[in-house]
């Protein structure tokens, strides 16, 4: 399972209802609202994608498959912006 | 600020001050809410507005909550673009061997707030040594950034200027400072002493240097008390956030303020922060402020920044008194009255217009920049 981490040069600010992230490859800041924004918080330390899904499904009482789709989508967007990167598997 | 706007400020900033906000019971009507939203944008208080609304300190309708969150989001998007511009400036200055220190927004956000998202800002501010200011300007010009106003005469920026302002092709403002404020108080600052206290912070994976806390506080006081004829809220919030926390910190501030002839400014900024923010300062600040003894020259300088009579001409004239040596004073005045490129005739006309008497009363001033 992929391990994700924030890119060191990514810039971000938490807002009252989400997170604004500017990855080094992005042309403009990207806003992600809560609860998906929690993925950014959890990536304060590198994390496996299934761990992220598990944590968020439990925290928000949501269907695991639904959370997995949302997490994958937000990670893909941030990866395209260079805001997150994949680490060698653990 | 109108009385209505002043009344909102303590509610908006209470969380930043660790104080209990005054609470109101019902949401504002549409007209007052629109004014509050515009006020928050003008004063760069979008984070404070969003937090006050979302914490319930300021009751709001669902639409108002969404608007407050949107304002915070847009403010933070701007801040991130500015942080990226700062990283770019850092790369360029490093290659050109231009030492610099980050001032105001980005520095205060990262060092003086638990969450940097609590501080909105609208430009990049850096301090560079006087002997590197031309090189810094060349670095920015090479990016296509345009300088907002010309140097009056060669060497003016390095010797007397507050600094210079650039606008990048993307529309972002980068201000390069030689000193902390326009006019006499800026010229009275010992720049070696200003550079002697710095503190690191990290942004975008890079370590930057900022002024240390006593110098950040003094800068906030200078900006808060002198930046505009009527103080803006965010510089006053910076005064509160960077204020000395104990007698030892106050002692560092007081020594610098005395040497920089800024005691009147510090006293004024503390008063303005208390009045505008409903700030309850630490005991060290209250006790220390009572012991400040500003001289008459400081009081006179301070008056030139205040009220409706403020102008760059008045500030420039007052600044003469802060310049040591008749030769430097003469060079300064010549640069302002007779800038490079102007003809003798235009210089005399300018000087006559700005220094001369007018019917109905005397009007004194010296050509200068805003």
Image: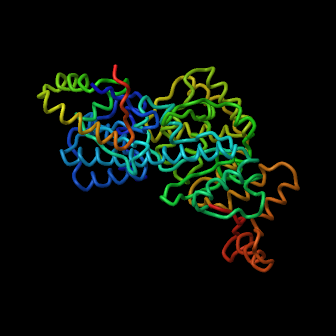
- Left or right: residue B313 compared with residue B233: right
| Residue at (18% x, 35% y) in the render | A69
Residue A1: x, y in percent? 27, 24
Q: Which image quarter is the C terminus of chain B in? A: bottom right
Residue B218: x, y in percent? 62, 37
User: B164 above or below B27?
Assistant: below
- In this view, the residue farthest toward the left is A63
**Residue A72 vs residue B151, the one in the foreground:** A72
Residue B301: x, y in percent? 69, 50
User: B50 above or below A45?
Assistant: below
**Residue B325 vs residue A81, the one in the foreground:** A81
Number of marks in the image? 0
| Residue at (74% x, 69% y) in the render | B355
| Residue at (48% x, 37% y) in the render | B204
- Left or right: residue B321 compared with residue B86: right
Q: Which quarter of the picture shows residue B206?
A: top right
**Residue B79 vs residue A68, the one in the foreground:** A68
- Left or right: residue B7 compared with residue B217: left
Residue B209: x, y in percent? 60, 34
User: B111 above or below B147?
Assistant: above
- In this view, the residue farthest toward the bottom is B345
**Residue B254 vs residue B204, the one in the foreground:** B204
What kind of colouring is applied to the model shown? rainbow
């Amino acid at each position: 399972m992929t391990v994700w981490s924030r890119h060191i040069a990514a810039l971000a600010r938490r807002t009252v209802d989400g997170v604004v992230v500017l990855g080094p490859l992005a042309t403009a800041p990207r806003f992600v609202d809560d609860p998906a924004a929690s993925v950014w918080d959890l990536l304060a330390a590198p994390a496996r994608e299934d761990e992220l899904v598990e944590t968020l499904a439990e925290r928000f009482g949501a269907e695991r498959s639904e959370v997995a789709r949302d997490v994958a989508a937000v990670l893909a967007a941030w990866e395209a912006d260079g805001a997150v990167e994949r680490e060698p598997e653990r | 600020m109108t009385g209505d706007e002043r009344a909102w400020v303590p509610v908006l900033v209470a969380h930043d001050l660790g104080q209990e906000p005054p609470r109101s019971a019902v949401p504002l009507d549409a007209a007052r809410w629109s004014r509050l939203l515009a006020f928050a944008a003008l004063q760069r208080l979008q984070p404070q507005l969003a937090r006050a609304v979302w914490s319930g300190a300021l009751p709001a309708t669902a639409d108002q909550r969404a608007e407050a969150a949107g304002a915070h989001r847009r403010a933070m998007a701007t801040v991130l673009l500015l942080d990226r511009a700062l990283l770019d400036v850092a790369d360029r200055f490093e290659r050109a061997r231009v030492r610099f220190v980050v001032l105001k927004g980005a520095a205060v956000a990262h060092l003086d707030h638990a969450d940097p998202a609590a501080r909105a800002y609208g430009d990049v501010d850096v301090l560079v040594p006087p002997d590197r200011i031309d090189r810094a300007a060349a670095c920015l010009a090479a990016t296509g950034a345009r300088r907002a106003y010309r140097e009056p005469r060669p060497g003016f920026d390095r010797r007397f200027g507050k600094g210079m302002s650039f606008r990048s092709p993307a529309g972002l403002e980068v201000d390069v400072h030689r000193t902390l404020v326009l006019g006499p108080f800026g010229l009275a600052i010992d720049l070696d002493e200003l550079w002697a206290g710095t503190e690191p912070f990290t942004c975008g994976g890079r370590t930057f240097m900022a002024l240390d806390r006593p110098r950040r506080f003094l800068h906030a006081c200078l900006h808060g008390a002198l930046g505009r004829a009527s103080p803006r809220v965010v510089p006053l919030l910076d005064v509160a956030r960077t204020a000395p926390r104990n007698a030892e910190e106050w002692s560092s501030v007081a020594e610098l303020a005395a040497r920089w002839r800024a005691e009147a400014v510090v006293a004024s900024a503390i008063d303005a922060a208390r009045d505008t923010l409903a700030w309850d300062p630490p005991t060290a600040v209250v006790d220390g402020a009572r012991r400040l003894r500003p001289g008459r020259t400081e009081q006179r300088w301070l008056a030139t920044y205040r009220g409706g009579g403020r102008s760059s001409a008045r500030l420039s004239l007052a600044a003469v008194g802060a310049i040591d040596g008749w030769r430097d004073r003469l060079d300064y005045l010549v640069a302002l009255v007779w800038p490079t490129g102007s003809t003798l005739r235009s210089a005399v006309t300018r000087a006559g217009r700005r220094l001369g008497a007018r019917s109905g009363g005397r009007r004194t001033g010296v050509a200068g920049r805003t």
